[in-house]
Image (spheres, rainbow, N blue to C red):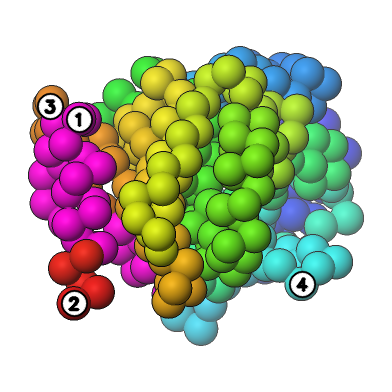
Amino acid sequence: MTDKREKERSAVNGANRMPIDPNLTPAVKNPEVEELLAAYNQEKTGEAFGRLVEALRSARLLLPATYNKNGQPAPCLVTTPEGDKLFSAYTCMERIPSISKNPAVINMAFVEICRMTARAADQIAGLLINPFTDNLVFRSSLLEQLAETEKDGGEGSRTAEPYVVYERGRFEFSFLPNRFFAHKKSLIDELCADKEECIDRLFEESYEQKRMYPYLPEDFSVIAMNISDDLLLVRVDLPNKDIKETSCWRVYLAWNEMSGVGRYFTIERSKEKGVRRLGEITGDGGHTDHGEAPMEGAELSRIIEIVKEEEL
């Protein structure tokens, strides 16, 4: 190793720190991950992102760290211009700038970084990989999804692109119900007028990485039904591809014109093979489980029953 490299490593790891343990060794190389990072930053496609995540799943990264009062290394944080706090990680020692003043470097598996970030999601907004070169951010919600995938044996990441699965769950369980409860009748009117074009437009709007949006209006089906003078139900069928336990087959938006009250129901894929759940997202973001969903032809009747029962 050259004197220059030794000096750079000392600048990062600190000259007077405690003896380093094996888990803190900076001997990490990730040429495949670096190649896929560059490809993703150039292409910005779901396929490129999927290949990158697959490579990261078995990778170890380097996190600049400081020592806490107990003498244990703790990952450092970077703050974005918007005020978000992120962990930062590097694919190899050479990616860490020599001017870094951090006294230690932690060698950690990417999957463990996902778990660590997910556990601190109320304070940490995500992970920044290679800040000075690739500058790629993984948001905490996505890292939590990846951590859950690993917990389940990793099958999810092979059956559907992780980013697409993440965005789909966020749209169905958060973005769309939030938009509905915020805009109420105006969203219902928009859905009734533009149907598939409307839901496609909303779904694409929710995507953090717009260029990775994979759907077309024909992947959806929107049917508006006047159940009575004061009750309107809009059924939204969602794409059959990319569906897993965190996804919905379809959702129903119920609107009572007289009371001005909206209800948002979900037909969810269950972990139990062949079982679908009937759920409901409430205005405060809560989730209600209404039990096993009936056969498709009976879904509408059951939802009407629930709405009518709670109106009595």
Residue 289: within the magenta? yes
Tag of residue 66? none
Q: Are marks 3 and 2 in contact (CB under 8 Å)?
A: no
Label 1 or label 2, whichever lies nearer to me, is 2
Residue behind mark 1: 297
Are there few (<14), some (14-19), or many (20+) residues within 10 Å of tag 4?
few
Give amino acid for label 2: Leu
Stretch of the chain drawn in magenta: 280-307
Residue behind mark 3: 273
Residue behind mark 4: 83
Residue 119 in sight: no
Secondary structure type for disc 4: loop
Q: Earlier in the sequence, mark 2 or mark 4?
A: 4
Report the residue at 65% width, 41% height from top.
193
Report the residue at 65% width, 48% height from top.
190
Residue behind mark 2: 312
Please state the horizontal and vertical placement of residue 18, each as a whole percent of the image: 54, 66
Please state the horizontal and vertical placement of residue 285, each as a whole percent of the image: 42, 68
Are there few (<14), some (14-19), or many (20+) residues within 10 Å of tag 3?
few
Give amino acid for label 3: Lys
Q: Which quadrant of the rendered structure holds the C terminus?
A: bottom left
Distance from Cα at disc 4 to Cα at disc 1: 49 Å
Label 3 or label 2, whichever lies nearer to me, is 2
Please state the horizontal and vertical placement of residue 36, each as a whole percent of the image: 68, 19
